[in-house]
Image (spheres, rainbow, N blue to C red):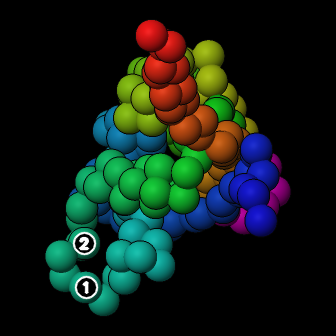
Amino acid sequence: MTKPPYRIGFGWDSHEFVAGVPLKIGGVTIAYNKVGAPDIGTLFPPSDPRWKGADSTVFLEEALNRVKAAGYAIGNVDSSLVLLAPKIGPHAGNIRGHVAKLLGIVVDCVGLKAKTPEGMGTDHAAIANVVVLLERATAPKKAAPAKKLKS
């Protein structure tokens, strides 16, 4: 069975703000007096002390290695953040640029939107929704064997 040319991944995550833990979005640290803990996911269990406070780029690199090993490449990524504060607008360009660099894609392939959690009761948390388009990586073309000339 051949691999499909495209795959889509969707992720949702939330963290309650915790004083003393830096707020990082897309690998960019944002100054804020209330901050959220980084996601360590199922591959990096919270019970393992190696991952306590680790930079989220470690987890992204692992995800990218798995994507590549499966024969895919990142096509684009689009994210929506839900948080009351801090305001993301002043940081959006920096976040998009950093994510693009980490993923090895152009900035135009990184979407970032931010919304406030009006009436959701999540004023002390940050929520991230992310969709990633994966494209089947093309295998390098093999050169055709040289034809033998008749003498």
Looking at the rendered structure, the secondary structure element under dot 2 is: helix
Give the CA distance from mark 2 to mark 1. 6 Å
Q: Position of residue 100 (x, y in %)?
A: 47, 27
Q: Nearer the viewer, residue 132 or 49?
A: 132
User: Tag on residue 51?
Assistant: 2
Q: For the residues labelled 2 and 1, say whether their Cβ atoms are less than 8 Å apart.
A: yes
Q: Nearer the viewer, residue 52 or 85?
A: 52
Question: Residue flagged by tag 2: what amino acid is it?
Answer: Trp
Magenta residues, start to end: 118-124
Q: How many marks overall?
A: 2
Looking at the rendered structure, the secondary structure element under dot 1 is: loop
Image position of 140 with respect to 134: above or below? above
Residue on which the image places disc 1: 48
Residue under the point 75% across and 58% down: 2
Residue under the point 47% across and 79% down: 42
Label 1 Cα crowd, 10 Å radius (few <14 / some 14-19 / many 20+): few
